[in-house]
Image: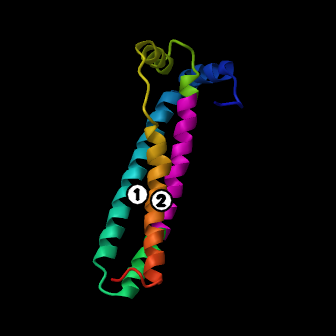
Amino acid sequence: MIKSMSNEFLNEAFKNQKKDIGWDFYAERQFIENLFCQRFNYLIAIYAIIIAGAGSAKNQFFLNCILCIGFIVVFLLSLVLYRAYIKLIILLKILHRLESHHVFPIIETEMKQQGKTALFGVNSLIGVYIPVFFNLTILIGLILSLGGCLKA
């Protein structure tokens, strides 16, 4: 829950955004969600390239280099993805707190009346758990490779 802003403040901000600048919470959500998905796609592509490179390394030195550089790149991409995830979650919380005639509260009310609920949060899966898994698998591979347990 957004604790630093009241519902009245958020609704007033939404009205002013629409009237004054034409850019509102919905446009920002669309922009951030698109950015979030693009960054996740880059993370998947880079991870796949690193795993393929590690699998085809000709010697131990190249394997260690690929995994070390790969870990750094995936870690940095994960940080950028996490930043977009946090912004998206904040925007979604704001949109759910707008007045009842806006889209998000209407959909939420209808879903509750139908007894429909999400099984789990996909945004947290994409923004937190999958990047952590990617980082851990590369780090474990690097440790095993440096320890001599994983051979090229």
User: Please, which residue is most extreme toward the right here?
Assistant: 4
The stretch drawn in magenta includes residue 86? yes
Q: Amino acid at mark 1?
A: Leu
Q: Earlier in the sequence, mark 1 or mark 2?
A: 1
In this view of the protein, can residue 23 be seen by the observer? no
The residue singled out by tag 2 in the image is: 77
Give percent across and percent down for residue 58: 29, 85
Count neighbours of disc 2 (C-alpha within 10 A) and say few if under 14, some if 14 to 19, many if 20 or more: some
Q: Residue at x 27, y 77 (%)?
A: 56
| Residue span colored magenta | 72-93
User: Which of the numbered marks, if any, corresponds to residue 16?
Assistant: none
Give percent across and percent down for residue 113: 44, 12
Count neighbours of disc 1 (C-alpha within 10 A) and say few if under 14, some if 14 to 19, many if 20 or more: many
Q: Residue at x 46, y 16 (%)?
A: 112
- State how far apart marks 1 and 2 are (Cα): 6 Å
Q: Kindly indicate whether the residue at mark 2 contacts the one at mark 1 (C-beta within 8 angstroms).
A: yes
Label 1's element? Answer: helix
The residue singled out by tag 1 in the image is: 43
Point out the image quarter for the C terminus: bottom left
Point out the image quarter for the N terminus: top right
Give percent across and percent down for residue 26: 48, 28
Q: Nearer the viewer, residue 2 or 138?
A: 138
Residue 23 drawn above or below residue 37: above
Q: Nearer the viewer, residue 30 or 57?
A: 57
Q: Nearer the viewer, residue 19 or 116?
A: 116
The stretch drawn in magenta includes residue 82? yes
Q: Is residue 45 left or right of residue 113?
A: left
Q: Is residue 12 left or right of residue 38?
A: right
